[in-house]
Image (cartoon, helix red, strand yellow):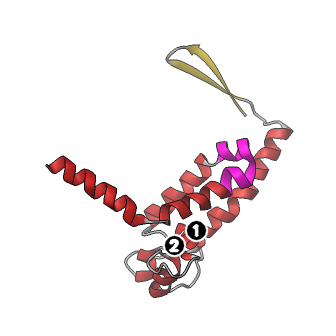
Amino acid sequence: PVRVRRTEPAMVAVQIRWPPSDRARAQMRGYALAVAPLASALLVIPTVAAAAGAEPPALWPTLPISHAMLLRRFTRRNTSEWWTALTCALAHLDAQHRISNVISLLFAAHLPYSSFGPLLGLYLPFFGGTLLGTWDTSCGRQVQLRHKLDRQT
């Protein structure tokens, strides 16, 4: 538990209570149990670069997925396979991309989780954001292209 006390308009003092209360421990335990399956799923799928042999494999065990299978089942190239709209959230180009996403998930998801619970604060934004991000990428590309052309003319 962190208490924030304003001392001046531009200064903020942070007070951390240690040891945490039983309520805070229960909330941390619940968060760890809720975020562990997502973080584990992100870490167990090999990166595209590792599957292609362009980077060393992870230091932990990953699933034995070939590069071709990773591209076919975990990327949004084939839109006839509806489940790739969700599994593409687990595929990462390289190790740096994967670890930055895992760290972002661990730190950024705590506030929505504590405010809305695991379903509305963690899983719905994760998979809902993935679905919206893969819905129709051509629309976003058209807008980007239009803005680029407008800037050049």
Place of residue 108 in the rendered image (x, y in percent of width and height, measured from the top left): 58, 47
> Does residue 143 show up?
yes
Q: Quadrant of residue 145?
A: bottom left
Q: In the drawing, what numbered circle is on residue 43?
A: 1
Give the tally of numbered discs. Answer: 2
Three-letter residue code for mark 1:
Leu
For the point 45% across and 62% down, which residue is it?
97
Placement of 46 over or under 136, stated as above or below? below
Q: Nearer the viewer, residue 118 or 104?
A: 118
Horizontal side of 21 relative to 132 (left or right) equals right
In terms of secondary structure, what is the magenta stretch mainly?
A: helix
For the point 19% across and 47% down, which residue is it?
151
For the point 83% across and 36% down, which residue is it?
21
* Number of other residues with Cα within 10 Å of mark 2, as a class: few under 14, some 14 to 19, many 20 or more: some
Asked if residue 92 lies in the magenta stretch, the reply is no
Horizontal side of 142 relative to 68 (left or right) equals left
CB atoms of marks 1 and 2 within 8 Å: yes
Three-letter residue code for mark 2:
Ala
Q: Quadrant of residue 146?
A: bottom left
> Does residue 56 show up?
no
Placement of 112 over or under 79, stated as above or below? above
* Number of other residues with Cα within 10 Å of mark 1, as a class: few under 14, some 14 to 19, many 20 or more: many
Q: In the drawing, what numbered circle is on residue 70?
A: none
Q: Secondary structure at mark 2?
A: loop
Q: In the drawing, what numbered circle is on residue 58?
A: 2
